[in-house]
Image (cartoon, grey):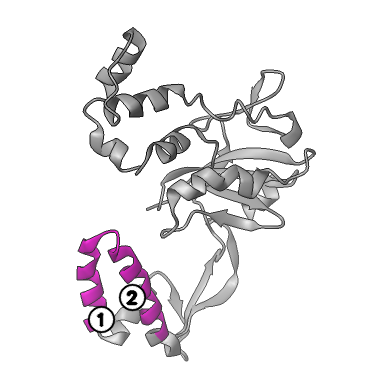
Amino acid sequence: MVNRHFNVLVAGVNHPSLMDKYDSNRIVEKYVAFEYAKAEEYRKKFLEGLEEAAKYNPSVQENIDFVKNEDIDDFYLDLTEEYEYDPETGNAISTKNPDGRFDSCRIAGNFAMPFILKNGKEVYSALKGDIDWEKMNADPTPYETAWDLVIGGKKPKNDYEKNIYENMKNRTAYFEAFGNKGDYVAMSTAFWCYAFVSDKNGWVEIGHSDDQVEWVKNFYKKFVKNLPDSTLLTLYECTREP
């Protein structure tokens, strides 16, 4: 799962420095990014990633066949084409931030939903204990109703339900992609972010092979629930080149 625009939840008063660590634009001291002597190891790992992707996208098989049959020197040059080379070893040298996770970021205010505080105020940075977490989850009623009408075969009983049905009746495939009503409602209503950042955890994001539904359903419990109420939480909006 790769998003060009995505939200990140950062825990800590030092959130600017935490995010700076993962800025892809940050220049670091020169280091060896790839070793020429390990080209076959890199190809093996690269193929493992492609084979995992092929489980979800069969068209990737064409890339797998190409990489398997490619000359190893050509593979290495393709892999490292954006780097400098050590003339003696052939190693690829870089000053790119190896921890880079985004190309741009800012404290939210554009597309991310804000925190709702217990006093009703909407903000993008607040202490965990000041946030009304019940209100951070959307009302499940319209989503439950939509599922019951379109998938469950329920007949609309009033104008409210008729309106929902008319808007969603042709989206059967969309509903079925969630597998069941519980997962659909959870995906549509739960508070979650693409990544979580803290001093303790570092940067943790949903991976290519992770179950998105499980990530969404467990995000609060896994990353937020056990934090002290005095923890400052800040929402960031980031972009990443595809």
Residue 202 position within the rendered picture, expressed as x and y whole percent measured from the top left: 65, 58
Kind of residue at disc 1: Lys
Mark sitting earlier along the chain (2/1): 2
Residue 65 position within the rendered picture, expressed as x and y whole percent measured from the top left: 21, 76
Q: Residue at x 47, y 37 (%)?
A: 186
175 drawn magenta: no
Kind of residue at disc 2: Leu
57 drawn magenta: yes
7 displayed left or right of 235: left
Q: Quadrant of residue 79?
A: bottom left
Q: Residue at x 69, y 50 (%)?
A: 17
Task: Measure the C-alpha gap from mark 2 to mark 1.
Answer: 8 Å
Q: Is residue 211 above or below residue 137?
A: below
How crowded is the residue under tag 2: few (<14 C-alpha within 10 Å), some, or many (20+)? some
- Per the image, label 1 sits on a secondary structure element best described as helix
Q: Residue at x 41, y 22 (%)?
A: 142
Residue 129 position within the rendered picture, expressed as x and y whole percent measured from the top left: 75, 33
- Per the image, label 2 sits on a secondary structure element best described as helix
48 displayed left or right of 238: left
Check disc 1 and report the residue beneath it. 68
In this view, which residue lies farthest toward the top? 159
Q: Quadrant of residue 149?
A: top left
Residue 221 position within the rendered picture, expressed as x and y whole percent measured from the top left: 62, 45
- Residue 13 appears in the figure: yes
Check disc 2 and report the residue beneath it. 47
Assign the magenta stretch its main secondary structure. Answer: helix
Region rendered in magenta: 41-69
Are dots 2 and 1 in contact, CB under 8 Å? yes
Q: Is residue 22 above or below residue 94?
A: above
Residue 242 vs residue 229, the one in the foreground: 229
Residue 184 vs residue 101, the one in the foreground: 184
